[in-house]
């Protein structure tokens, strides 16, 4: 299993004993990891890529930030950790206005489109909006939000996702900032959930098939 090849040294925050344990031992001793088949993207690779994305975003968004027009809209809850890490690489002036959207309710693993959403914040007229989400799958969520933002008067809408599934999309979305292209698998961790669980895993992993029902 890929998990057993993951090296110690990445588990810095787990105390002295666990720092000395191979990651395989650490994982197998935690019931949360029983459901994990393999790590797809480990925490160090995520951190490196997020930093690079931050640099790309600074270059693209500085003009809007410098004239006070930049607003960042993280799509909660999936982008919670991604947003927190990414935005600390942006030494720019902007407001953060999270919205909560649900597209995969409960145990569903196929997109239902947006099924619940909090209202957009006021004051978007003329703004450059950076939409930040965890993953681009069917494209329905980002596509729908882009339309809403344009209707709300946003002058420019930029999309940033950590993951993009390599599948034909129901709704085409022009996503300028992408962390990783991944195959068509259901992933959890680093904010991504299955039935509300596993968001707190530091790596992005594929669940064992029997765990998905
Ligand atoms: P879309 O509307 O089909 O593009 O789906 C986007 C939303 O579905 C994302 O914001 C995620 O919350 C969720 N999602 C899509 N794929 C996955 C996955 O593999 N794991 C967990 N959540 C996912
Ligand atoms: Mg989401």
Image (cartoon, rainbow, N blue to C red):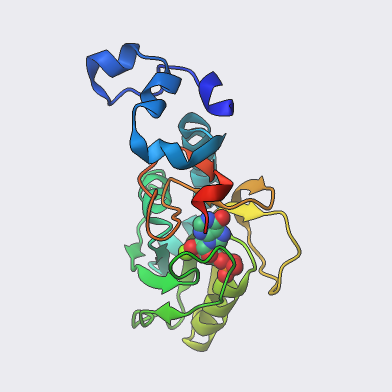
| Residue 180 position (above or below residue 31) | below
Residue in the foreground of this view, choosing between 160 and 4: 4
Task: Report the quarter where the N terminus lies.
Answer: top right
The residue at the far right in this view is: 168
Across and down, in percent, residue 140 comes to: 60, 74
| Residue 119 position (above or below residue 67) | below
Across and down, in percent, residue 98 comes to: 35, 67
Residue displayed at 68% across by 74% down:
171
Residue displayed at 46% across by 42% down:
35
In which quadrant of the rendered view does residue 201 lie? top left
Residue displayed at 76% across by 64% down:
168
Horizontal placement of 193 versus 97: left or right?
A: right
| Residue 89 position (above or below residue 164) | above
In which quadrant of the rendered view does residue 41 lie? top right
Residue in the foreground of this view, choosing between 157 and 100: 100
* Residue 131 in sight from this viewpoint: no
The residue at the far top in this view is: 20
Across and down, in percent, residue 77 comes to: 38, 62
The residue at the far bottom in this view is: 151
Residue in the foreground of this view, choosing between 194 and 90: 194
Horizontal placement of 76 versus 179: left or right?
A: left
* Residue 127 in sight from this viewpoint: yes
Across and down, in percent, residue 162 comes to: 54, 51
Horizontal placement of 156 versus 118: left or right?
A: right
């Amino acid at each position: 299993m890929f998990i057993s090849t993951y090296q110690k040294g990445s588990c810095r925050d787990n105390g002295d004993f666990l720092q000395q344990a191979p990651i395989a031992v650490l994982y197998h001793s935690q019931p949360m990891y029983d459901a994990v088949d393999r790590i797809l993207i480990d925490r160090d690779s995520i951190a490196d890529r997020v930093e690079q994305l931050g640099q790309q975003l600074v270059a693209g968004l500085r003009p809007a930030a410098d004239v006070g027009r930049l607003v960042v809209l993280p799509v909660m809850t999936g982008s919670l950790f991604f947003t927190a890490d990414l935005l600390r690489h942006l030494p720019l002036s902007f407001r953060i206005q999270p919205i909560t959207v649900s597209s995969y309710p409960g145990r569903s693993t196929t997109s239902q489109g947006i099924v619940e959403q909090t209202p957009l914040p006021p004051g978007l007229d003329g703004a450059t909006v950076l939409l930040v989400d965890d993953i681009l799958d069917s494209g329905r969520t980002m596509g729908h939000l882009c339309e809403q933002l344009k209707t709300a008067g946003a002058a420019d809408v930029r999309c940033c996702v950590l993951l993009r599934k390599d599948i034909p999309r129901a709704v085409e979305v022009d996503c300028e900032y992408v962390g990783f292209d991944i195959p068509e698998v259901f992933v959890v961790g680093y904010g991504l959930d299955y039935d509300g669980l596993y968001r707190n895993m530091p790596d992005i992993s594929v669940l064992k098939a029997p765990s998905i029902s």
